[in-house]
Image (cartoon, helix red, strand yellow):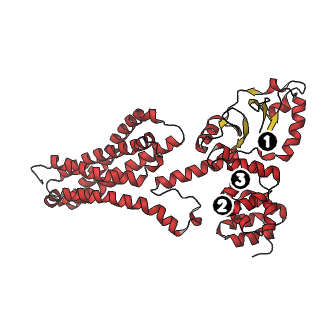
Amino acid sequence: MNDSLTQDELADAWPVLDTAERLQAVGLLSRPDAEDLFLTVSTRDQAELVLAMEPAERRMWLRLLAPDDAADLLQEAPLAERAAMLALLDPATRREVTGLLAYAEDQAGGLMNPHYARLRPDMSVAEATAYLHRFARAHRDTTYYAYVLDAEQRVLGTASFRELFAADPARPITDVMRPDPVTVREDLDQEEVSKIFAAHHFLALPVVDDAGRMKGVVTIDDVVDVVREEATEDIQKIGGTEALDAPYLAVGFASMVRKRAGWLSALFLGEMLTATAMGRYEDEIARAVVLALFVPLIISSGGNSGSQATTLVIRAMALGEVGLRDWWRVIRRELASGLVLGSILAAIGLVRILVWQGMFHAYGAHYGLIAATVSLSLIGVVTFGTLAGSMLPFVLRRLGLDPASASAPFVATLVDVTGLVIYFSVASVVLRGTLL
């Protein structure tokens, strides 16, 4: 390990180092640089680093963290280590962290920081700014807004630092504050919290209990992590695997196989229906072998259109752009889209068959009927795939399941079977009396 190492160099190399190498490298940095780096790495990496330290070293690193960050680190640590790590904190922080650990990790209470700027309603602006000047030096991470609380700790209003410093120092704080602030319940799911941030563009939100008493604040920094985590989970599910609970390289081999094998097996069983459908139309294929040439084209087009639709709808649901009540608007939109997209692919398929026939005489005397069969089938399969892909997330949401479970491979497998039925049904009508 290089004896002269900068914080930026270590940050670049961090992903490829194991825990022992990271710990050794941190020791080569100056104390301020090491602390800055420690505060910027993920909670999982912080936990692994602290657990690799000697017990005497753990205390000073744990005490660098804000209570909410310390609680997150303890949740990453093994259960057997948590009590000992908690004992390393000072009594006041220990009480705060213990309170935070009572919340689920994915709730607003689990995200919040119990340190926030609180003001009395009888304060003047001058008194408030004097207090906030002292508060900001000790708690920079949560210094976005000040909260005016009554004697019962209920939120009466909020005031930004900019508004306070611009106001007349003699004015009462109640004249400057914004009443009826937006709050989040302590048991609200983190994904819903992120939607509230996105809707209102706040830097921090107060967290309240059932009685409206303020418990802490959730900051935009916490929500950025939530959005990344939720998006990662959705993308993994859309790809046809269980959500990973750790970075890709940190997931054990057996765990990775287990998370992928379930979905892959289910999809394989689904594809067996495709083989069954092919067997059902074995006589038609024997009489008109040319039909088999276009099976991959037909079913892949339906699967691709379905995957497109389900991905768009799942993302729209995640962003709050589409709700259950919008299903009819979506189905009308996707019906029109499916017909247009199917017609585009049908035109391309028609041209391809006609060109190949002209150049190579590949499809015999009934090439025109074959072209019509393929074109009409593409319109039907793409339209069905688009409708199925767009509606499946609605069905899952209605059943109380995660819409992201409507993975693109699952939709493609579903449309493969129906695509074959549509294709050979169209062929039996168009080619009756000629090839069939």
Q: Position of residue 313 (x, y in %)?
A: 46, 42
Q: What kind of element bears circle 3?
A: helix
Residue at left offset 76%, top offset 48% = 96
Most foreground residue, 58 or 392: 58
Amino acid type indicated by mark 2:
Leu
Mark linked to residue 162: none
User: Can residue 204 be seen in this snapshot?
Assistant: yes
Q: What kind of element bears circle 1?
A: loop
Q: Position of residue 375 (x, y in %)?
A: 26, 47
Q: Position of residue 401 (x, y in %)?
A: 46, 45
Mark 3 vs mark 2: in front: 2
Question: What residue sits right under mark 2 in the picture?
Answer: 79
Residue at left offset 87%, top offset 34% = 129
Amino acid type indicated by mark 3:
Ala
Residue at left offset 85%, top offset 47% = 138
User: Can residue 356 be seen in this snapshot?
Assistant: no
Q: What kind of element bears circle 2?
A: helix
For marks 1 and 3, the one nearer the N-term is: 3
The image quarter containing residue 114 is top right
Query: As displayed, is residue 221 above or below residue 257?
Result: above
For marks 1 and 2, the one nearer the N-term is: 2
Amino acid type indicated by mark 1:
Thr
Q: Position of residue 397 (x, y in %)?
A: 45, 41
Question: What residue sits right under mark 1 in the picture?
Answer: 143
Most foreground residue, 127 or 98: 98
Most foreground residue, 338 or 164: 164
Q: CA distance from mark 1 to mark 3?
A: 20 Å
Q: Are marks 1 and 2 in contact (CB under 8 Å)?
A: no
Report crowding for label 1: few under 14, some 14 to 19, many 20 or more residues within 10 A (C-alpha): many
For marks 3 and 2, the one nearer the N-term is: 3
Residue at left offset 74%, top offset 31% = 154
Question: What residue sits right under mark 3 in the picture?
Answer: 71
